[in-house]
Amino acid sequence: MAINSTISGILRAYPAIMMYSTLLLYVMTSDMDFLYLLIVLFLGEGINYTLKYKFLKPIFGDHIPFLGMGSRPTGAKDCGLFLSSKKSKKKITSYGMPSGHSQNSALFAIFLILKLLGNGINISTIVKIAIISGLSLSVMVSRWVFKCHTVGQIAIGAALGTFFGVTAFKFKDYVLHFI
């Protein structure tokens, strides 16, 4: 049971882990790509919040045409970054569309994969890509398993994260020219 709890905690805290890891990579390597990725991850959080609470929830409420349910699934609890210290009966009121965990894990994974591919393909690169992809997919699946999001919310979050990751990587050199 302790292993499940540890894995659950890691997957829930993955957005924070990504940001701390990216900051650590920047400090250790002085590679400006990691500082840029950290900024992009923070912007992704802001975009996710804006989409949820300034656009989708006020306009569509609980049902978004063609996309499905906007609110979290019935019975959603303990869906934040960290597990509650005690069993909470408090109803989750945060909005579920799109999944921020899925969005940020996809953004992080896509950006790192594109960075790795820029260095050429070898067995080491393939293993790293497999690990990064596996972690990202694990986070997405965990959001469904923990009943924090519907499959649609996870898919939309992943699609947005993929778009932001590709876009951020494409404009990386242009933006870093000004830093």
Image: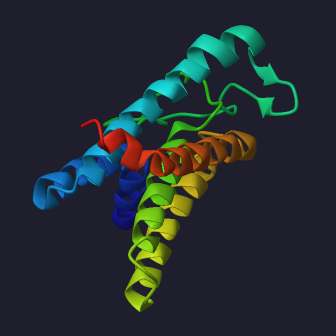
Determine the residue positioned at 43% across, 54% down: 11
Res 178 seen here: yes
Q: Quadrant of the C terminus?
A: top left
**Vertical relation: 120 (above or below) 62:** below
- The residue lying furthest to the right in this view is 66
Determine the residue positioned at 34% across, 59% down: 6
- The residue lying furthest to the left in this view is 28
In front of the other: 156 or 164: 164
**Vertical relation: 127 (above or below) 3:** below
Determine the residue positioned at 69% across, 34% down: 73
Res 83 seen here: no
**Vertical relation: 74 (above or below) 167:** above
Q: How many marks?
A: 0
- The residue lying furthest to the bottom in this view is 123
> Where does residue 21 sit, x and y in percent of width and height?
25, 54
- Please indicate whether residue 114 sits to the left or right of residue 149 in the image: left
> Where does residue 89 sit, x and y in percent of width and height?
50, 26
> Where does residue 143 sit, x and y in percent of width and height?
57, 48
Q: Quadrant of the N terminus?
A: bottom left
> Where does residue 165 sit, x and y in percent of width and height?
51, 49
**What colour scheme was applied to this rendering of the protein?**
rainbow
In front of the other: 59 or 44: 44
